[in-house]
């Protein structure tokens, strides 16, 4: 399975996916990294790992659809099978999402469907939840709403602020995303309509 990772910033989730894919039995190969910002720190890391990496700068396109078309062209040119969004901070047009339906994953720093959108750790603290975490899901046109592949939970501790909570969640993200990618790329999890079925589940 040929995987492209899309980033916007430091790409810490990208790093954990690259590391996991080095295992000889990992069912996917990271063959491309794309960033919507030329300054994305993750680009240098990917290149240092020998992975083709380039910026497709969203500010150099007249509109969202043209940016998405450039992304689509770059992905299809490399015969990408699966796209992993990792700290990617752009919202796609429905057309792009439909083109990659069932072939695009995202990691979101909350236990979806709770706390969609941004500032999820602040949302969790404001809601007073005792459990928080992260979710890997298939991407659908609606933001942070796709079928869930995997989740990991962390406790919220008294005295937590968004930074301390984020620090606890990101550790789980770095464990969860590689595991979820392996499930999907290895064919042990698959999308059937709007549900994720796992190997052994009755279809
Ligand atoms: C992470 O919390 C991730 O869940 C969210 O963006 C944050 C930074 O991700 N999507 P990364 O370090 O750039 O992978």
Image: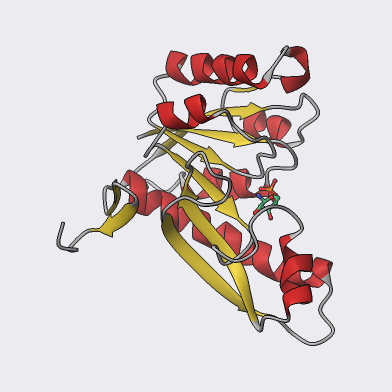
Q: Is residue 201 above or below residue 48?
A: below
The residue most toward the left is 202
Which residue is found at the position 57% from the left and 28% from the top?
93
User: Does residue 25 appear in the picture of this structure?
Assistant: no
Location of the C terminus by quadrant is bottom left
Q: Residue at x 39, y 20 (%)?
A: 79
Q: Which of 146 and 10 lies nearest the eye of the viewer?
A: 146
The residue that appears at 45% across and 13% down in the rendered structure is: 77
Q: Residue at x 35, y 54 (%)?
A: 183
Residue 179: horizontal and vertical position, in percent?
A: 44, 57
Q: Position of residue 83 (x, y in %)?
A: 48, 35
Query: Is 72 on the left or on the right of 39, as rendered?
Result: left
Residue 187 percent across, percent down from the top left: 26, 48
Q: Is residue 112 above or below residue 79?
A: below
Side (left or right) of 132 relative to 177: right
Q: Quadrant of residue 38?
A: top right
The answer to which of 154 and 171 lies nearer the viewer is 154
Figure colour scheme: secondary structure
| Image location of residue 137, percent across then percent down | 47, 52
Count of number-bearing discs:
0
Quadrant (top left/top right/bottom left/bottom right) for the N terminus: top left
Q: Which residue is most to the bottom?
A: 158
Q: Would residue 93 be visible to someone looking at this image?
A: yes
In the foreground, 130 or 11: 130
Does residue 165 appear to the left or right of 1 in the view shown?
A: right
Foreground pick, 145 / 59: 145
Please state if 149 lies on the left or on the right of 49 as rendered.
Answer: left
């Amino acid at each position: 399975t040929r995987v492209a990772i899309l980033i916007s910033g430091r790409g810490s989730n990208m790093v954990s996916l690259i590391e996991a894919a080095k295992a000889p039995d990992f069912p996917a190969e990271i063959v491309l990294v794309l960033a919507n910002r030329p300054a994305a720190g993750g680009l240098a890391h990917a290149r240092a790992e020998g992975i083709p990496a380039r910026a497709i700068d969203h500010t150099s396109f007249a509109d969202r659809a043209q940016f998405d078309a450039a992304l689509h062209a770059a992905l299809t040119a490399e015969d990408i099978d699966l796209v992993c969004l990792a700290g990617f901070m752009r919202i796609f047009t429905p057309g792009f999402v439909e083109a990659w339906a069932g072939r695009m994953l995202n990691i979101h720093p909350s236990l979806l469907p709770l706390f969609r959108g941004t500032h999820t750790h602040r949302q969790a603290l404001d809601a007073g939840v005792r459990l928080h975490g992260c979710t890997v899901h298939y991407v659908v046109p609606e933001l942070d709403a796709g079928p869930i592949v995997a989740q990991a939970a962390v406790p919220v501790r008294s005295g937590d602020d968004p930074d301390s909570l984020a620090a606890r969640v990101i550790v789980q993200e770095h464990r969860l995303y590689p595991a979820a990618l392996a499930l999907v790329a290895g064919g042990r999890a698959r999308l059937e309509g709007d549900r994720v079925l796992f190997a052994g589940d009755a279809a």
